[in-house]
Image (tube, grey):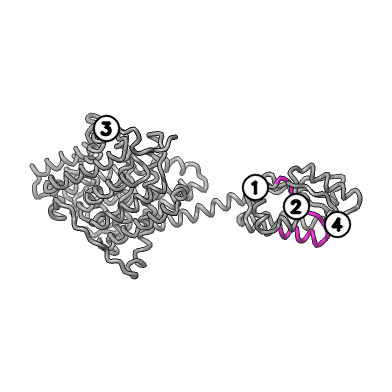
Amino acid sequence: MKKATRFQDYSAERLQKDLIAGLVVGIVAIPLAMAFAIASGVRPEYGIYTTIIAGILVSLLGGSRFQIAGPTGAFVPILLGVVMQYGYENLIIAGFMAGIILVIVGLLKLGKFIKFIPKPVTIGFTAGIAIIIFSGQIANFLGLHNIEKHETFHLSMWEIITNLSAINIYSILIAIICLVIVLIAPKFIPKVPGALLGILFSTLIAVLFFQGKVATIGSTYGPIPNELPAFQWPELTVDTIVMLLPAALVIAMLGGIESLLSAMVADSMTKTKHNSNKELVGQGIANMATSLFGGIPATGAIARTATNIRNGGTSPISGVVHGLVVLIVLLVLAPYASHIPLASMAPVLMVVAFNMSERKEFAHIFKTKTADSAVLAITFLLTVFFDLTTGVGVGLLFAIIMFVKRMSQSLHVSQTKNDDEKSQLQMYTLEGSLFFGSAERLEEATDSIIQSNADVVILKMEQVSFIDTSGEDLLSNVHQRLDEDNRALLITGLDAQPKEMFLKTGLYDRIGKQHFFSQASKALDYAQSFLHTKSKPYANKSKQPAFSS
């Protein structure tokens, strides 16, 4: 896989491809930007501001030349929760702080560690977010616009159920028209975004036949200004930073995951390789800048990035063009967006939620009926019924516990019997990782070793690739107890990491270099030469033959 060089061999032909791809992605991004902003509890133009600023900056500064950034569905439940709890102004500050965190993570070159989040956790919270987005649009689909909003799924659904008598049949009709067009348009007009066609056609019907009978962007939020907002520095105080730090950390974590996942999708589609740390720095700077102009948090958008690639995008120019297209539309056509019914936005987000739900991967993992299934279910249910922070936090904790349990069970200690000299020489084979999780099993084995009557104990460690200080401490205890009884401990096949740990803690020197062997046969020869002469290996260390491992 080749590294993505951003403008190598750039030509007029590639520029033409970037212009076309940027135009298509820009058109796709406009309805999604407004829809995600509305779903997040803020005015629709804030989503447009985010698409323009973050889209251009991430393309110029990020680590993937194909990345398209902007508001995404993954952020919806988090941003809505922040807005409901702290207000829009504090959401801007939280987004700014998240940008700083992403820059720091990228500069510290920690991007690769974000990829280590277990797949069941990622699939679990992604599916949970999809449920929240989908259910959050039911009210707009039904024309229920005067009901109370809630952060949690079950309270929102109960609010809808108790207000079903107030449904608006015109809103339902508009939503159905838009939904049908969104679903069938790709089959007949694949080059034109279905979401755009659905919103345009359903809006036209609403204006011609249902004027004043359905809630629109204009009737709910007022007219959309056809200009960019003024620069405004956030009012950062110690109390505000402390209050918003948890939200900022979640936004940064989610933004980092989504951006790197999107970049990885781009890699697989183009056979290139992105720079994960540079991508995080670019995302961080973009989020800081977006916040300074009233935008909401942004990240890499997988669907729009894929659309960019499928339409021929070859460099960051396509992402810049996408942002400029949205800017031109804002300046020229913003007043017309006020006529878009909220019912037209609902099916667009519902389809987005369905597509992002990872339903096949969810079913695949769940059917395994393993610990991964439990991690998946826990993350999903807690994300839906509590919040994303709880879902991811508990899911990660449970995944770590399950991992430690599996690793502890992977440790095996077996004894190789020697019938001729079983009272004098015992050999044990260790397999697996010697770490705190396997301490109990290892302790049982070491007790057996210490209690044996063998004058020489050989530990075969060829199959031990990792040892931590807990495992080292137990082996140190074995050596100390044997040494106190004038008995010998020999070790064979020590791997690089365990040897480094022994050297750092001094155990290597305490056991003695002459008692480490590359092969068990050499350790047996060494031990038997002493046993046959009734000599203990520790009797006179200075005269013992040494073997360098």
Q: Quadrant of the N terminus?
A: top left
What segment carries the magenta color?
476-493
Give the numbered dot on residue 17.
3
| Residue 467 drawn at (x, y percent) | 64, 52
Q: Which mark is residue 542?
A: none
Callout 2 amino acid:
Lys
> Which sits earlier in the primary sequence, circle 1 or circle 2?
1
Q: Quadrant of residue 522?
A: top right
Disc on res. 496: 1
Which residue corresponds to mark 2? 513
Q: Nearer the viewer, residue 289 or 481?
A: 289
Quarter where residue 394 is shown: bottom left
Q: Which of marks 3 and 2 precedes in the sequence?
A: 3
Tell me the element at label 2.
helix
* First along the sequence among labels 3 and 4: 3
Residue at disc 4, secondary structure:
loop
| In-image side of 418 versus 53 (left or right) | right
What's the residue at 27%, 63% (across, down)?
234
Image disc number at residue 540: 4
